[in-house]
Amino acid sequence: MPRSLEPLDLGIQIPYHFRCPISLELMRDPVTVCTGQTYDRASIESWVTTGNNTTCPVTRAPLSDFTLIPNHTLRRLIQEWCVANRSNGVERIPTPKQPADPTSVRALLSQASATSGTHVSARSRAAAIRRLRGFARDSEKNRVLIAAHNAKEILIRILFSDDADSPELVSESLALLVMFPMTEHDQCVYIASDPGRVEFLTRLLFDSSVETRVNAAALIEMVLTGSKGTVSNYESVFEGVLDLLRNPASSYPRRALKIGIKALFALCLSKHTRHIAVSAGAPEILIDRLAAGLDRCDTERALATVEILCRSPEGCAAFGEHALTVPVLVKTILRVSDRATEYAAGALLALCTAEERWRDEAAAAGVVVQLLLMVQSECTERAKKKAQKLLKLLRDSWPDYSFANSDDFACSEVVPF
């Protein structure tokens, strides 16, 4: 068997026994199967799960036992080789974290849910959940394993139980719970339909711990989305969520903004709550955040919320009074994504329909050029229709020197009004 394979792009030869026989790449987490052959963990797991393969890829012997034993000796040799070849651009592979095993997960969940016993305390229960949270952070595979052991139901029961008076136990159970998607409709309804549980989450929105506040907002968003319904105590919920957006903590700035925007969008989906969002100051906070800059997904969701709130007269009035609303919306068109363009155009259409002064402001901000580009671009048909409606509204707001009387406008492909 050859000692090494052909040189890679790095210009060095990787020892043959450092390469996974399946992927032929440098092994990062070498494990040995029952036949004695070593593979990279990700490769052999993929081999077994995709195609239901039950034989060893190299020896073709049956895999009577699917236990994967970490090959620590080989992993250390690979790491030493990486360090020795650092000058050639080789990065040292990190020491892999071992996956959680079902026995440990069951034991930790049992410890977390125990309410009586010789050594049972809120601290010991919180410690068990903290260990589970560490496993969940390590990999998606661990999260799937933990969820398969009914973890969400157990955590919900712990979080909303009468004996959950320990801030540490509440914080840890909430932090682990929001790491799993709340796809079960019944679980979401169980939380959303009970005023006491909603009140409890609302109080957590004002907790002294920033992480707890962010996680409470995350759970509220997941519950609203999963239940397709509403919750009680909206005024306080809006206040807590908007406070995350108004003053994102320095320790969790990006996550606080992302969760806050998602929660606000979910809250505003109900027509009956939009006036509360406007009264609570959502328009000002949304425009300030958009002006400061957000990533693409957050920008899209924030603009979608702006468009939703602009559907009411009080929403239009609140956004229109903010000096940056029109300039921010005009600037967003065709600069972020097709979705962002559509939402920005929709919000501008609502504003320009409401009052003439905002039509004049939009025209002065250069929206006409953006709209003409929109109707000729590959954006969605809904966005193009909004652009055409806006152009109709803005005809009287164009100054004499604008596109209304220019050859450029006459030659454009705008559908005749």
Image (cartoon, grey):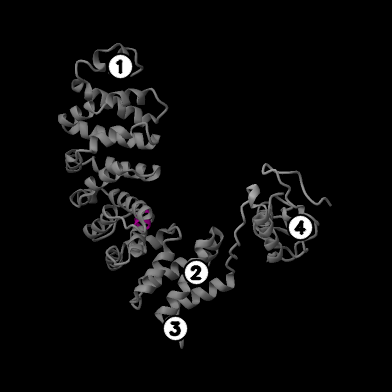
56 vs 64, nearest the viewer: 56
Residue 67 can be seen, yes or no: no
Counting other residues with Cα less than 10 Å from the Cα at mark 3, is it few (<14), some (14-19), or many (20 or more)?
some
Asked if the stretch drawn in magenta spans residue 213, the answer is no
Mark number displayed over residue 416: 1
Quadrant of the image occupied by residue 167: bottom left
Counting other residues with Cα less than 10 Å from the Cα at mark 4, is it few (<14), some (14-19), or many (20 or more)?
some
**Residue at image x 43%, y 75%?**
126
Question: Majority secondary structure of the magenta segment?
Answer: helix
For residue 10, side relative to residue 263 (left or right)? right
Q: Quadrant of the C terminus?
A: top left
**Tags 4 and 1 touching, CB below 8 Å:** no
Find residue 368 and report its horizontal and vertical position in percent.
28, 24
Q: Earlier in the sequence, mark 4 or mark 2?
A: 4
Q: Marks 2 and 1, Cα distance to the nearest angstrom? A: 63 Å
**Tags 4 and 2 touching, CB below 8 Å:** no
Q: Please give the residue where the numbered disc 2 appears in the rendered image.
A: 132
356 vs 52, nearest the viewer: 356
Please name the amino acid that badge 1 sits on. Answer: Pro
Please name the amino acid that badge 2 sits on. Answer: Leu
112 vs 99, nearest the viewer: 99
**Residue at image x 73%, y 63%?**
33
Judging from the image, what secondary structure is the residue with disc 2 in?
A: helix
Judging from the image, what secondary structure is the residue with disc 1 in?
A: loop
Please name the amino acid that badge 4 sits on. Answer: Cys
Q: Residue furthest front?
A: 87
Q: Please give the residue where the numbered disc 3 appears in the rendered image.
A: 120
Q: Please give the residue where the numbered disc 4 appears in the rendered image.
A: 56
Find residue 400 and report its horizontal and vertical position in percent.
19, 15
- The stretch of residues the image draws in magenta is 221-225
Residue 316 can be seen, yes or no: yes
Q: Earlier in the sequence, mark 3 or mark 1?
A: 3
